[in-house]
Image (cartoon, grey):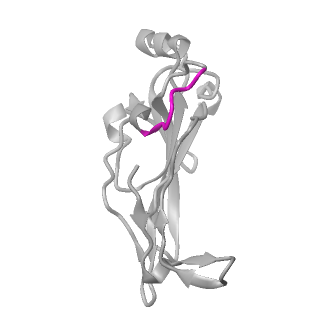
Amino acid sequence: MKEEPLGPDDMWYCPHCKEHRQAIKKLDLWRLPNILVFHLKRFSYGRWTKDKLDDFVDFPVQNLDLSKYVKCEDASGMSHIYNMYAISNHYGGLAGGHYTAHSKCKDGRWYHFDDSYVSSVEESEVNSSAAYVLFYERVDSDVEAKYSNGGEVGESSQGCEDIF
């Protein structure tokens, strides 16, 4: 991951000298969890402005490979590959909006949830400029085999049969 210089608007506060100072922020990943949650920055706050960011973020639904971001090899031999199982979407602006969700259920299909309305959707439809929170689960050999066979996708992906 790249180092990020902190600018004049977001300087680091030094607890020793008790002053705000320019610094460089760097993040390292040493281990990865079984479930990853990405919160996309959809709101921008400046000194005088506040905006909703509706930029399209192209994210993978299958095979998100984080191997190159992990600082060292995981001694357990766990995979660094993830598959998406849900997305929370936000429509609207800063003053208000509406949330919907997409979820991949045990039947291997994707569904769109909008209040009390539920519909089946194609995987290609889940990526949109409204994506706000992305949910991924680690692919291990058991889960990978289930995905390729079109069966159950793992314990964290809940069934949808109760919603119909």
Image position of 67 (left or right of 107):
left
Specify the segment rendered in magenta: 69-75
Residue 25 x, y percent position in the rendering = 48, 63
Across and down, in percent, residue 35 comes to: 59, 35
The quarter in which the C terminus is drawn is top right
Q: For the point 47% across and 30% down, which residue is it?
A: 82
Residue 72 highlighted magenta (yes or no): yes
How many labels, in total? 0
Residue at 47% over, 77% down: 22
Residue at 51% x, 19% y is 107
Which residue is rendered at x = 54% and y = 11% of the image? 142
Q: Is residue 38 magenta?
A: no
One can see residue 163 in this view? yes
- Expressed as whole percent of the image width and height from the top left, the position of residue 78 reads 55, 21
**Seen from this angle, which residue lies furthest front?**
17
Front-lying residue, 71 or 131: 71
